[in-house]
Image (cartoon, grey):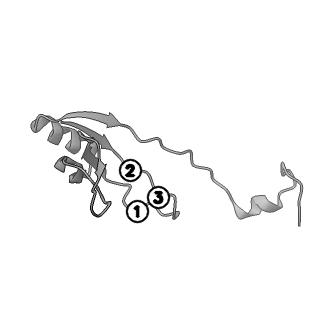
Amino acid sequence: MFARIFKPAKTAMQSGKAKTQDWVLEFEPASARHPDPLMGWISSSDTRAQIRLTFETKDQAINYAEHHGIAFRLIEPEVPPKIIKAYADNFAYNRRQSWTH
């Protein structure tokens, strides 16, 4: 029983950062998935793959895993650099690129 504790990244489909503030504890798959011969759906005998716990802080997630004897791997989030831009920079004289309009 091995788990991952991580902070999810923002979705690539939208620019918002919803559901990225909480820490997530989820179990790594213990067995391979296989297609059902009748319907073709992918199934697995591992029921822990359905469990996804969310915590407000990293410490809460670590304490939960240690209290319940769950081996875990902590994945720290990569924080992208903040690039501060102003609309006036489009019209600056010292632009790196030439004006195209």
Q: Name above or below for residue 52 compared with residue 6.
A: below
For badge 3, the amino acid type reads Thr
Please name the residue shown 17% across and 50% down the image.
47
Please name the residue shown 36% across and 47% down the image.
7
Read off the residue under disc 1: 18
What's the CA distance linking mark 2 and mark 3? 9 Å
Lower sequence index among marks 3 and 1 = 3
Residue 57's disc is: none
For badge 1, the amino acid type reads Ala
What's the CA distance linking mark 3 and mark 1? 8 Å
Q: Is residue 49 toward the left or the right of residue 12 in the image?
A: left
Q: Is residue 53 visible?
A: no
Q: Residue furthest front?
A: 38
Lower sequence index among marks 2 and 1 = 2
Read off the residue under disc 3: 11
Please name the residue shown 89% across and 62% down the image.
100
